[in-house]
Amino acid sequence: MGLFQKLATFLGVKKKEVNVLVVGLNNSGKSTVVNKFKNEDERVTDVVPTVGFSVERFQTFDMSGHGRYRDLWEHYYKDCHGIIFVIDSSDRLRLVVVKEELDLLLQHPDICNKKIPILFFANKMDSKEALSSVKIAAGLGLDKIMNKPWHISSSNALTGEGLQDGVEWLTQQIREMIIAKQ
Ligand SMILES: Nc1nc2c(ncn2[C@@H]2O[C@H](COP(=O)(O)OP(=O)(O)O)[C@@H](O)[C@H]2O)c(=O)[nH]1
Ligand SMILES: [Mg+2]
């Protein structure tokens, strides 16, 4: 069963009820992560056609300092249930840019007071240059995030390694959030 199929089944929700935003700098691996899920979901869709869990809900955006599309993706902050923040662990030079983007995200009016769970993928763990998830967490100051559940998983989006653990964590968080609101 595909990861997000599992998420849907576990949450007991039907189409389009859970919105997950996938963000990160360009080249961090967002499309690879989402395609991994998409492929799995498509395989499942062949087997169980009635349980559709469309990948459309996974909005993906390249964050960058150039504001051209910023309004467009920030628009999705309003209705998102969870955020997947993908980081290229081997791109040490841009970790400071990642931190700037993360800080902007956390300060955004549609995000700052909400308990939206954030899953960080310290992606490209297979690279020789990759920093550990502990170092990434320290570099980004994740311990300062007090009002949101967060979790960091090392991942290799090419093989799928680490994606499952992360998504299971996110699933549990979104589920708790939905139950708490009922
Ligand atoms: N070694 C390695 N390469 C990866 C990994 N994930 C993605 N890539 C590669 O990194 C490049 C950028 O990935 P992409 O998903 O297009 O990044 P996006 O710009 O964030 O959507 C592509 O060449 C991917 O094949 C990974 O975990 N390990
Ligand atoms: Mg992409």
Image: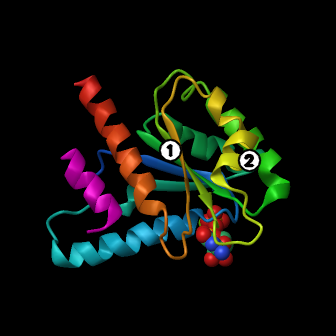
Residue 174 relative to residue 117: left or right: left
Task: Look at 38% across and 62% down and name the residue there.
Answer: 55
Disc 1 or 2, which lies upstream in sequence?
Answer: 1
Which quarter of the figure has residue 103?
A: top right
| Residue range highlighted in magenta | 1-15
Q: Secondary structure at mark 2?
A: helix
For badge 2, the amino acid type reads Val
Label placed on residue 83: 1
Report x, y in % for residue 54.
Answer: 32, 61
For badge 1, the amino acid type reads Ile
Q: Residue at label 2?
A: 98
**Tag 1 near tag 2, CB within 8 Å:** no
**Which residue is outermost to the right?**
93
Report x, y in % for residue 23.
Answer: 59, 51
Residue 8 within the magenta-colored segment of the rendering: yes
Position of the C terminus, as image quadrant, is top left
Task: Look at 44% across and 48% down and name the residue there.
Answer: 20
Residue 129 within the magenta-colored segment of the rendering: no
Residue 84 relative to residue 46: left or right: right
Q: Label 2 neighbourhood size at 10 Å, few (<14), some (14-19), many (20+)?
A: many
Q: Is residue 153 visible?
A: yes
Total labels: the figure holds: 2
Residue 86 relative to residue 37: left or right: right
